[in-house]
Amino acid sequence: MRRVFGLSLASILICSGLAIAQDGEPTPTPPADPTQPGQAAPATPEVERSPEEVARRARLVARVGEVRITVGDVEDAINEQSPFVRVRYRDPQALREFVDGMVRFELLARAAERAGLDDDPEVVHATKQNAVQQLIRRDFDERITVDAIPQADVQAYYDAHPEEFNSPELRRAAHIRVATREEAERLMAEARAADTRAFRELARERSTDPETRLRGGDLRYFDDQGRPRNQRDPQVDEGLARASFALENIGDTAGEPVQVGEEWSIVRLTGRRPAEHRTIEQAAPTIRLRLWRQNRQGGIEDFVAQLRRDAHLENVDYDLLRNIHLDEPAREDEGNEERGGVVSVPMNEAPAHPTEVEAPQAE
């Protein structure tokens, strides 16, 4: 726990902006994020070392009160750094400065403990957080690695999700919709002569399409059936899709107005993306990482569920959350002055790619 408290204090001191090292001195490195693969391997356990190696690593470099800094401690601290950083400690002076930094940190940790900061809520929370991170890293991240995901599982995911690895050719277009064909024909010459920015301005001024007018007539990307690339976007009219796919070059404008329901549109091609196919070899690293994350999260959820059962945890009374008060944020129309008071938050209310060719999209 002393080690975990030290890591917690290091993070807090760094976040508080306390300069505990001079220029060139090493500073404590916060714990790595255990949610990502590729964490540094843990130090080799003592049982795997020869007696001579154990004795060498146990030699005392410095003592700060009851804390011993050994040769092994220094080695482990340096080996936690990236290979690029480790190289600098081949220099004896840099190595001395690193050890001085370790001593300085332990002195500050002792001062913090004497000041009672080991009981400070922020330190206690950070200690728990570091302990949880180490538990997750030890019991999940180091037991099942990304490379351990079977190839059969990768192949099964690839076969079950073809839409993720195959996409048709996509086009992007902008249009100006007006009420009649006659009006569209009168506007056609001006639209064809306009550059991208002018075409967008013309759409903002003249288009009757409420969905696209404010964004300059932009229909975004869609396939030859009008299906949008982004599922949150609406379906594009099939006539507009056909007209867009009939155009060859970015910036080309259809020679005739396109009927859309009872109205008519002038269509311009603004972007294109070729069809894409990713082989299993190309997709495997992404799939393997995704499956590893799913397995890891599933393992953690099962572990927590077992902990809940073992702890005989009673049901959480979520109804009491209705009584929680949150500080009301200052409103912009009242300036930047802080406002007092609290506001109740009812529980039933919520607060409000591949290679592509595209014309510049003016804002």
Image (tube, rainbow, N blue to C red):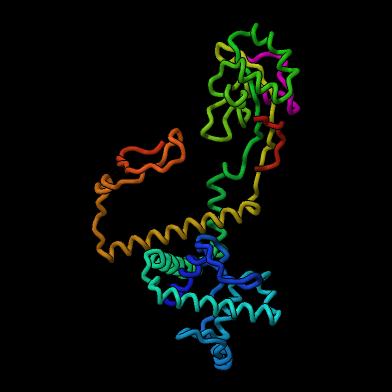
Residue 259 higher or lower than 285, as above or below:
above
Residue at image location 47% in from the left, 73% down from the top:
6
| 266 within the magenta span | no
Residue that sits furthest to the top in the current view: 182
Residue 236 higher or lower than 165, as above or below:
above
Foreground residue, 12 or 131?
12
The picture places residue 224, in percent across and down from the top left corner, at 63, 28
| 247 within the magenta span | yes
Visible in this render: residue 132? no
Quadrant where the image shows the C terminus: top right
Residue 289 higher or lower than 142, as above or below:
above
Residue 82 higher or lower than 75, as above or below:
above
Residue 75, quarter of picture: bottom right
Residue at image location 48% in from the left, 71% down from the top:
7
Foreground residue, 266 or 349?
349
Foreground residue, 123 or 286?
123
Quadrant where the image shows the N terminus: bottom left
The picture places residue 96, in percent across and down from the top left corner, at 64, 81
Q: Which residues are magenta?
A: 244-259
> Is residue 341 rendered to the left or right of residue 174?
left
How would you classify the magenta stretch by its main secondary structure? loop
Visible in this render: residue 249? yes
> Is residue 56 rendered to the left or right of residue 333?
right
Residue at image location 40% in from the left, 73% down from the top:
115
> Is residue 21 rendered to the left or right of residue 141?
right
Residue 60, quarter of picture: bottom right
The picture places residue 162, in percent across and down from the top left corner, at 57, 44
